[in-house]
Image: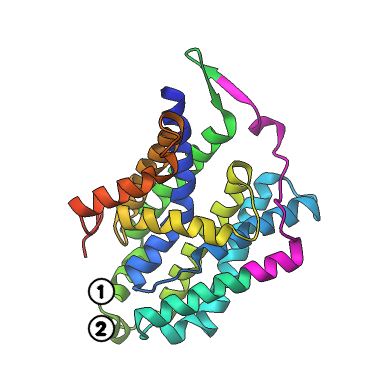
Amino acid sequence: MVIVLFDGFAFGMLLFVLSVGLSVTLGLMNFINLAHGAFGMLGGYVAVTAMRQLGLPFLLSLPLAFIAAALVSVLIERTLFRRLYRAGELNQVLFTIGLVFVSAAIATYLFGTGQQPIVLPGWLRGSVEIAGLRFGVYRIFLIVVSLAITALLVFGLERTRLGAQIRAAVDNQRVAAGLGLNVERVFAITFALGSGLAGLGGALAIEIVGLDPSFGFHFLVYVLIVVAVGGLGSITGSFAGAALLGIGDVAGKYFVPEIGSFLIYLLLVAILLARPLGLFGKR
């Protein structure tokens, strides 16, 4: 039972890294970016390329995945997404889901349709024994990284000048601009942060779930569930929602494999019936 909870929590932390960026951009910027999963896929392929072609170690490929996804997202935000900020939700949905199809086609052309495995360093492979139970080293690594990201995000949004600027720009763009705040730059930074975290999550996910051109579609469902359950714009909510869904998914597949794949959808319905705004949603 403890191992199931541990594996579920580790999977939940992977979902958290992948989804928290969408929670920030959707909850704070009110922009429906269904291409979020494509940035995760981009980060995964950047990590694979860095390790195979450049010979970089796994740990150095992770910041590269973050930076690449962040830079590409800024380029797309400046040239394409910015035109849709004041458009209707349907326009945002159709355009961003179209980008997922485009990114999948590009990935298929460049890398083929097969899985892209990676070789982890020796110290991240295997397991350690604690109190007679064996825990996967890589899953422990995932949990540590996710907890560090959570702490940095909470501190950054609540305790720093940039966090105050983001909250001010979201609350009232016209007033913030009138006070001298560069709202466009703040939004670009916020978007880059959210997409960069998706890229980092994509790189971290390769060892657990693999990587192929359907990554952007497959994990978009999980990401949207985490955001809906946790509540828009809430880092705490994304963390709690991801942990709950990760444990529910793994436990369901282990204890009731007949319906395990559908258990997270049942949890989604039950939680939203009780709390339509999510666990920590405010609006």
Q: Is residue 61 left or right of residue 194?
A: right
The quadrant in which residue 114 appears is bottom right
Tell me if residue 228 comes above or below residue 257 in the rendering: below
Spot the residue most to the front: 258
Residue 253: give x, y in percent of width and height: 45, 35
Near-viewer residue (162 or 24) = 24
What SS does tag 1 mark?
A: helix
Tell me: 54 left or right of 2. right
Residue 106 belongs to magenta span: yes
Select label 1 or label 2 by which is in front.
1
Residue 9: quarter of image: top left
CB atoms at circles 1 and 2 under 8 Å apart?
yes
In this view, the residue in front, 241 or 266, is 266
Magenta-drawn segment? 104-128
Disc 1 residue type? Asp
Residue 138 spot, x, y in % from top left: 58, 35
As drawn, the label of residue 175 is 2
Quarter of the picture holding the C terminus:
bottom left
User: How far from the left and from the top, in percent, is residue 6?
Assistant: 45, 30
Of residue 120 and residue 150, the one placed in the foreground of this image is 120
Residue linked to disc 1: 171
